[in-house]
Image: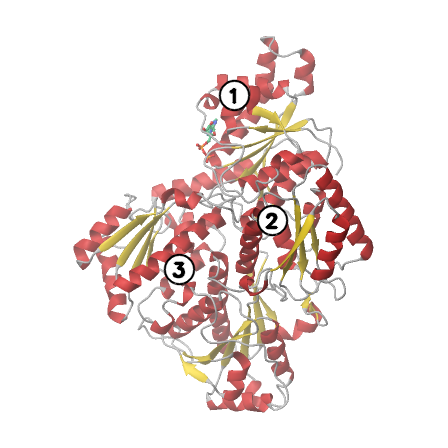
Amino acid sequence: MSKNNINCIGVMTSGGDAPGMNAAVRAVVKTACKSGIDVFAIYQGYKGMVEGGDMIKKMTSDDVGGILHKGGTAIGTARCHRFRERAGRLVAAKNLIERKIDNLVIIGGDGSLTGANLFRDEWPGLVQELLENKEITKEQAQRHPLLKIVGLVGSIDNDLSGTDMTIGADTALRRIIDAIDAISSTAASHERTFVVEVMGRNCGYLALFSAIATGADYVLIPERPPVDDDWGKSMCDYLSEGRKAGKKKSLVIVAEGAIDKYGNQIRSTDVVSKLKEHLKVDVRLTILGHVQRGGSPTAFDRYMSIVLGHAAVKHLIESTGDNESKIIGLQKNHVTELSLTESIDRTRSIAKYIKEGNFDKAIELRGGSFNDELKTFKTLAQAFPSTETKSGRKLNILVLNAGSLAPGMNAAVRTAVRIALEGGHNIYGVKNGFKGLAEGDIVPVSWMEVEDWASEGGSFLGTNRMLIEGKDFYEIAKTLEKWKVDGIIMIGGSTAYVNAYRMLQKKNDFPAFDISTVCIPATINNNLPGTDFCIGSDTALNNIVDAIDKIKESAVATTRTFVVEVFGRYCGFLAQMGGLATGAERVYIHEKGIHLDDLKDDVKMLVKRFKEGKRLGLVIRNEFANKIYTTAFVSALYEEEGGDVFDVRQAILGHLQQGGKPSSFDRVLATRLAAKAVDLLEKQRDDEERQYYSLGLKEGQLVVEELDRLPSQVNMEYFRPKKQWWINLGEINDTFK
Ligand code: ADP
């Protein structure tokens, strides 16, 4: 990094706390220290800035050790009335100038960032006033003519326009779905009606996405109020239809900012009253409150915050253009610089449109996939397919799971089944992947059968890694002819893709293969082309991060290095991102190879760090990183060379990575991709086309690719995409050492 005449950097967290703030602070401090720039933590946000003294402390890399996995913010946050007044900001400016700080990284919500921008605008005037009052010297005034601001958005509501995700939102969603999953099982046992209130004053993100992820029945959000005047009655009619159709429970999710179409607030207690009044049932209300803010950040909140924190310091060092305040956010899975004022203005205009009742405009500005998700949710939550006449020919569709288990497969099948039935089609489940397809093991799947599948891990249809060959083709063709199949939705990993590709190659030999096929990427390894994320990989990453947190905690009283082996086959995604999210000292992946010289350097580096006071080391190795330098070998080498400086423990995480309930991200991804798959089959029908496609989420967009491109996109020997978007992110971690 080139040093851009930069003085000191101050970093602070402000406003409401959000999980992931610590990861961002850690990245800012470490990146600054590595770049030779002094960095100060301003404790308790603007309060610390105004109070000065010990509230503004110089940091070293070691000061931010051991905070990555913690929720909340280690440097504190507060609300500060004095900073809202110019007099308070004048004192704050003096405190910064005394420490030579004229670059700030502010991690907070729109209030904190607005305050920061105002401070920047006023800065030259504040400096002038301090000089006139003789509170600073002329040299000091000349040295700090401008204040530079970079904001990172810490907000669990995911409410800032312009960035796809805010720090803390993914974790909040995790807390919510964990709670709702638990509530759902008790609700179903007692056939009860539950109302759950989640956060979101002007933003229905948490409510809508948790409703999709948990298979809730009804959602109330600020951006799209119920259309009926008597919203309570229409909600109750809707829910009782579900009960009549066989739903065992009713679950209503209410955003705290929910309103009716006239802008009157709908409180969760109002929802309870309406349910009691119209349905005469026992209703339980759960207001999740601060549970949503708390706890350890998810893998995503950790690695996103690290990437953004690192980019914020880089921006301060490298940007030479105007002095406009920027927000560093994530757009289309890329780090992006946004104008702070524009983002805040757009965010505030959403609240304004909601207030004015211009809901279409509010939804439009929410951007991304919000509106599509809302529509998909409404279809999925119905009691049965709508009875209106469907256009187009009725299709016979098969849905199957293939390859190793990926959490989220059931959510994808559920959506495929319901969206297909809603479209008026016949849809059948194939048991046990391609084996079942060859054996003709096909079962009808009904609307109500998949009711509870959104949140369940495993694969109810069954899956395996069988690759088709020889007479399998003939058997599969027989099945397809028997069931008069028009299209297949294959949800799985490399097995699904390779088998689909093999069928495509045999299209001329078997006319039955001349159908429409859509592959949906589902594998924890995240090794498929045409997508940034595969269903299941986020769950596995979180499983890894949770396990490593526990492993690390087991070693408090020793000096120890852990060598942890993770899944991934020949793809280093889990190892690399797991390493970033847990602060590993070293990550070994097949893509980058393992070399003896590296191993020697790595051990030397660790010994040196331990001698300087380090107490815990972490090394992550992808299972197939190298045939010779196995996990046992690496562990033995570290043990031997670590001598009496540290001891070594090996941990092979194994199948715990594949188990458990899918993460909210995987459930939502599964839902989006499966809905799109049915859409694509219908489009092919309308275009009289019969193609083999794969689907994916690339740069934030759903994308469709032709499957015959597979060999050009994939390294077939090691089955992984030729381009991996995450491959260089590990370098950030390397610079922290
Ligand atoms: P959030 O950042 O989470 O939106 P707040 O809106 O409470 O939280 O803002 C946090 C702090 O930021 C406030 O206590 C205040 O010190 C400062 N702040 C917020 N808005 C402004 C403003 N318009 N002008 C000056 N300071 C502000």
Mark 1: amino acid: Val
Q: Which residue is mark 2?
A: 582
Quadrant where the image shows the C terminus = top right
First reached walking from the N terminus: tag 1 or tag 3: 1
Q: State whether label 1 is within 8 Å of ligand 1.
A: no
Q: Which residue is mark 1?
A: 50
Query: Is residue 327 visible to us here?
Result: no
Q: Amino acid at mark 2?
A: Thr
Looking at the image, residue 287 lies above or below residue 62 = below
Determine crowd level at label 2: few under 14, some 14-19, many 20+ residues with C-alpha closer than 10 A. Answer: many
Q: Residues within 10 Å of mark 1 (few under 14, many from 20)?
A: many
Task: State which quarter of the image contains the N terminus.
Answer: top right
Residue 732 relative to residue 427: left or right: right
Say if mark 1 contacts mark 2, CB within 8 Å. no
Q: Mark 3 falls on what kind of element?
A: helix
Q: Which mark is residue 214?
A: 3
Give how far apart the Cα atoms at labels 2 and 3 are: 28 Å
In this rendering, the label closer to the viewer, 1 or 2: 2
Of mark 2 and mark 3, the one earlier in the sequence is 3
Residue depicted at 70% across the width and 30% down the height: 37
